[in-house]
Amino acid sequence: MTDTNAKDDAMLRQTMYRYMTQELAEQLLENPEASKMESQVKEVSILYANICNYETLSEGMEPEAVVGLLNQYFETMVDAVFEHKGTLDKYIGAAIVAVFGSPLPLDDHAWKAVKTAVAMRDRLVHLNTQFASTNLPALQIGIGVNTARVGVGNISSSKRMEYTVVGDGVNLTVALERAAQEHQCDIILGEATYQYCADRIQVETLGSKLLSGRKQPITLYKLVGLS
Protein backbone atom coordinates (compact mmCIF):
# COMPACT_ATOMS: atom_id res chain seq x y z
CA MET A 1 0.00 0.00 0.00
CA THR A 2 1.40 3.41 -0.97
CA ASP A 3 1.64 6.27 1.51
CA THR A 4 -1.24 8.01 -0.28
CA ASN A 5 -3.44 4.92 -0.11
CA ALA A 6 -2.55 4.39 3.53
CA LYS A 7 -3.47 7.99 4.31
CA ASP A 8 -6.78 7.68 2.43
CA ASP A 9 -7.54 4.44 4.24
CA ALA A 10 -6.87 6.04 7.62
CA MET A 11 -9.09 9.01 6.76
CA LEU A 12 -11.89 6.68 5.67
CA ARG A 13 -11.67 4.78 8.93
CA GLN A 14 -11.77 7.95 11.01
CA THR A 15 -14.84 9.13 9.10
CA MET A 16 -16.64 5.82 9.58
CA TYR A 17 -15.83 5.77 13.29
CA ARG A 18 -17.89 8.96 13.63
CA TYR A 19 -21.03 7.17 12.45
CA MET A 20 -20.67 3.67 13.88
CA THR A 21 -18.62 1.56 16.25
CA GLN A 22 -15.07 0.71 15.29
CA GLU A 23 -16.09 -2.96 15.20
CA LEU A 24 -18.86 -2.34 12.66
CA ALA A 25 -16.65 -0.06 10.57
CA GLU A 26 -13.95 -2.74 10.35
CA GLN A 27 -16.52 -5.35 9.33
CA LEU A 28 -17.69 -3.11 6.51
CA LEU A 29 -14.15 -2.43 5.36
CA GLU A 30 -13.31 -6.14 5.37
CA ASN A 31 -16.46 -7.11 3.49
CA PRO A 32 -18.07 -4.13 1.72
CA GLU A 33 -20.53 -6.40 -0.10
CA ALA A 34 -22.07 -7.46 3.20
CA SER A 35 -23.53 -4.02 3.76
CA LYS A 36 -25.43 -3.93 0.43
CA MET A 37 -25.26 -0.17 0.26
CA GLU A 38 -27.66 -0.08 -2.68
CA SER A 39 -31.29 0.72 -1.85
CA GLN A 40 -33.22 -2.15 -0.30
CA VAL A 41 -36.06 -2.82 2.13
CA LYS A 42 -35.21 -4.36 5.49
CA GLU A 43 -36.45 -4.47 9.04
CA VAL A 44 -34.56 -2.22 11.42
CA SER A 45 -35.19 -0.39 14.66
CA ILE A 46 -35.06 3.39 14.60
CA LEU A 47 -34.46 5.73 17.51
CA TYR A 48 -35.32 9.41 17.30
CA ALA A 49 -34.21 11.52 20.26
CA ASN A 50 -34.93 15.24 20.43
CA ILE A 51 -34.29 18.02 22.95
CA CYS A 52 -37.83 19.10 23.85
CA ASN A 53 -36.93 22.48 25.33
CA TYR A 54 -34.24 23.39 22.81
CA GLU A 55 -35.95 26.47 21.35
CA THR A 56 -36.76 27.89 24.78
CA LEU A 57 -33.31 27.43 26.27
CA SER A 58 -31.42 28.56 23.16
CA GLU A 59 -33.41 31.79 23.04
CA GLY A 60 -31.71 33.04 26.18
CA MET A 61 -28.18 31.80 25.43
CA GLU A 62 -25.29 33.09 23.38
CA PRO A 63 -24.66 31.05 20.19
CA GLU A 64 -21.26 29.89 21.46
CA ALA A 65 -22.85 28.55 24.64
CA VAL A 66 -25.52 26.72 22.65
CA VAL A 67 -22.86 25.07 20.49
CA GLY A 68 -20.89 23.99 23.55
CA LEU A 69 -23.98 22.57 25.23
CA LEU A 70 -25.04 20.65 22.11
CA ASN A 71 -21.55 19.25 21.61
CA GLN A 72 -21.54 17.83 25.14
CA TYR A 73 -25.04 16.44 24.69
CA PHE A 74 -24.35 14.83 21.32
CA GLU A 75 -21.06 13.37 22.55
CA THR A 76 -22.61 11.46 25.42
CA MET A 77 -25.77 10.41 23.55
CA VAL A 78 -23.98 9.11 20.48
CA ASP A 79 -21.67 7.14 22.79
CA ALA A 80 -24.83 5.43 24.08
CA VAL A 81 -25.83 4.57 20.50
CA PHE A 82 -22.42 3.09 19.74
CA GLU A 83 -22.33 1.20 23.04
CA HIS A 84 -25.35 -0.79 21.83
CA LYS A 85 -24.07 -1.25 18.26
CA GLY A 86 -26.29 1.35 16.64
CA THR A 87 -25.37 3.55 13.70
CA LEU A 88 -25.71 7.34 13.70
CA ASP A 89 -27.95 8.17 10.76
CA LYS A 90 -27.98 11.94 11.07
CA TYR A 91 -28.51 15.01 13.24
CA ILE A 92 -31.61 17.09 12.56
CA GLY A 93 -31.24 20.32 14.50
CA ALA A 94 -31.19 19.17 18.12
CA ALA A 95 -32.37 15.66 17.26
CA ILE A 96 -30.44 12.42 16.81
CA VAL A 97 -31.56 9.70 14.40
CA ALA A 98 -29.99 6.30 15.06
CA VAL A 99 -30.55 2.99 13.29
CA PHE A 100 -30.09 -0.54 14.64
CA GLY A 101 -29.74 -3.29 12.05
CA SER A 102 -28.24 -1.36 9.15
CA PRO A 103 -25.97 -1.24 7.23
CA LEU A 104 -25.06 -4.66 8.68
CA PRO A 105 -27.62 -7.04 10.23
CA LEU A 106 -27.87 -6.87 14.02
CA ASP A 107 -29.34 -9.57 16.23
CA ASP A 108 -32.08 -8.36 18.58
CA HIS A 109 -31.95 -4.83 17.15
CA ALA A 110 -35.21 -3.78 18.84
CA TRP A 111 -33.82 -4.68 22.27
CA LYS A 112 -30.59 -2.83 21.61
CA ALA A 113 -32.54 0.26 20.55
CA VAL A 114 -34.62 0.12 23.74
CA LYS A 115 -31.51 -0.27 25.89
CA THR A 116 -30.01 2.73 24.12
CA ALA A 117 -33.06 4.83 24.97
CA VAL A 118 -32.73 3.86 28.65
CA ALA A 119 -29.00 4.62 28.56
CA MET A 120 -29.80 8.06 27.12
CA ARG A 121 -32.27 8.65 29.96
CA ASP A 122 -29.61 7.75 32.54
CA ARG A 123 -26.89 9.75 30.84
CA LEU A 124 -29.11 12.84 30.74
CA VAL A 125 -29.38 12.82 34.54
CA HIS A 126 -25.60 12.97 34.88
CA LEU A 127 -25.29 15.51 32.09
CA ASN A 128 -27.83 17.85 33.67
CA THR A 129 -25.95 17.59 36.97
CA GLN A 130 -22.81 18.75 35.16
CA PHE A 131 -24.74 21.56 33.48
CA ALA A 132 -26.15 22.74 36.81
CA SER A 133 -22.64 23.03 38.26
CA THR A 134 -21.74 25.52 35.52
CA ASN A 135 -25.08 27.37 35.52
CA LEU A 136 -26.22 25.84 32.23
CA PRO A 137 -29.91 24.98 31.81
CA ALA A 138 -31.18 21.43 32.18
CA LEU A 139 -32.21 19.56 29.04
CA GLN A 140 -35.43 17.63 28.55
CA ILE A 141 -35.55 14.94 25.87
CA GLY A 142 -38.21 12.93 24.13
CA ILE A 143 -37.39 9.60 22.47
CA GLY A 144 -39.38 7.51 20.02
CA VAL A 145 -38.31 3.93 19.25
CA ASN A 146 -39.93 2.03 16.41
CA THR A 147 -39.27 -1.23 14.57
CA ALA A 148 -40.36 -1.43 10.94
CA ARG A 149 -39.52 -2.41 7.41
CA VAL A 150 -38.07 0.68 5.76
CA GLY A 151 -36.05 1.66 2.75
CA VAL A 152 -32.33 1.81 3.43
CA GLY A 153 -29.60 2.84 1.05
CA ASN A 154 -28.07 5.73 -0.76
CA ILE A 155 -30.39 8.69 -1.29
CA SER A 156 -28.73 11.13 -3.63
CA SER A 157 -28.79 14.07 -5.96
CA SER A 158 -26.19 14.85 -8.59
CA LYS A 159 -24.10 16.68 -5.97
CA ARG A 160 -24.54 14.74 -2.75
CA MET A 161 -25.12 11.18 -1.58
CA GLU A 162 -26.32 10.05 1.84
CA TYR A 163 -26.85 6.57 3.24
CA THR A 164 -30.04 6.74 5.29
CA VAL A 165 -33.40 5.18 6.14
CA VAL A 166 -36.69 6.38 4.69
CA GLY A 167 -40.33 5.41 4.78
CA ASP A 168 -43.41 5.40 6.95
CA GLY A 169 -41.61 3.57 9.75
CA VAL A 170 -39.23 6.50 10.08
CA ASN A 171 -42.10 9.00 10.09
CA LEU A 172 -43.83 7.01 12.82
CA THR A 173 -40.70 7.10 14.97
CA VAL A 174 -40.71 10.91 14.80
CA ALA A 175 -44.43 10.93 15.64
CA LEU A 176 -43.74 8.75 18.69
CA GLU A 177 -41.17 11.26 19.95
CA ARG A 178 -43.70 14.08 19.55
CA ALA A 179 -46.24 11.99 21.45
CA ALA A 180 -43.70 11.60 24.26
CA GLN A 181 -43.55 15.37 24.54
CA GLU A 182 -47.34 15.67 24.49
CA HIS A 183 -47.69 13.06 27.25
CA GLN A 184 -44.84 14.61 29.24
CA CYS A 185 -42.76 11.45 29.30
CA ASP A 186 -39.36 10.71 27.82
CA ILE A 187 -39.62 7.38 25.93
CA ILE A 188 -42.45 5.92 23.86
CA LEU A 189 -42.23 2.64 21.97
CA GLY A 190 -44.07 1.57 18.84
CA GLU A 191 -46.12 -1.62 18.73
CA ALA A 192 -43.54 -3.81 16.99
CA THR A 193 -40.73 -2.72 19.30
CA TYR A 194 -42.92 -3.42 22.31
CA GLN A 195 -43.83 -6.90 21.05
CA TYR A 196 -40.16 -7.80 20.48
CA CYS A 197 -39.19 -6.69 23.99
CA ALA A 198 -42.38 -7.21 26.03
CA ASP A 199 -40.91 -9.81 28.39
CA ARG A 200 -37.90 -7.63 29.21
CA ILE A 201 -39.45 -4.23 29.83
CA GLN A 202 -41.96 -2.44 32.02
CA VAL A 203 -44.40 -0.17 30.21
CA GLU A 204 -47.49 1.90 30.80
CA THR A 205 -49.99 1.70 27.96
CA LEU A 206 -51.22 5.16 27.04
CA GLY A 207 -54.03 3.87 24.87
CA SER A 208 -54.66 4.02 21.15
CA LYS A 209 -54.06 7.50 19.73
CA LEU A 210 -54.43 9.11 16.33
CA LEU A 211 -51.09 10.86 15.99
CA SER A 212 -50.55 13.92 13.84
CA GLY A 213 -50.16 12.97 10.18
CA ARG A 214 -51.41 9.40 10.73
CA LYS A 215 -54.56 7.81 9.28
CA GLN A 216 -54.79 4.94 11.76
CA PRO A 217 -54.64 5.04 15.58
CA ILE A 218 -51.40 3.83 17.16
CA THR A 219 -51.05 2.17 20.55
CA LEU A 220 -48.50 4.05 22.62
CA TYR A 221 -46.25 2.32 25.14
CA LYS A 222 -44.54 4.55 27.68
CA LEU A 223 -41.29 2.88 28.72
CA VAL A 224 -41.03 2.78 32.49
CA GLY A 225 -37.88 0.67 32.73
CA LEU A 226 -36.21 -2.65 32.05
CA SER A 227 -37.34 -5.81 33.83
Image (tube, rainbow, N blue to C red):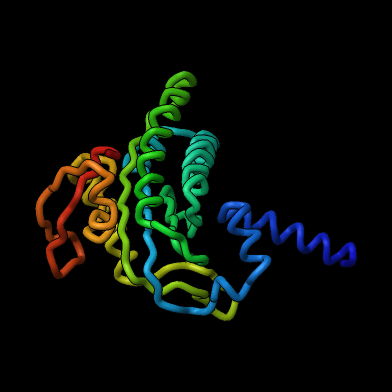
Q: Is residue 171 visible?
A: yes
In this view, 181 is above or below 217: above
Q: Quadrant of the C terminus?
A: top left
Numbered marks: total: 0
The x, y position of residue 25, in whole percent, is 62, 59
Q: Is residue 55 visible?
A: no
- From the viewer's perspective, tell me whether residue 50 is left or right of residue 86: left
- From the viewer's perspective, tell me whether residue 15 is left or right of residue 226: right
Residue placed most toward the observer, 205 or 52: 205
Residue placed most toward the observer, 31 or 211: 31
Q: Residue furthest right?
A: 2
**Quarter holding residue 107:** bottom left
Residue placed most toward the observer, 117 or 60: 117
For the point 49% across and 74% down, the residue is: 153
In this view, 18 is above or below 159: above
- From the viewer's perspective, tell me whether residue 164 is left or right of residue 170: right
The x, y position of residue 208, in whole percent, is 10, 56
For the point 67% across and 65% down, the residue is: 29
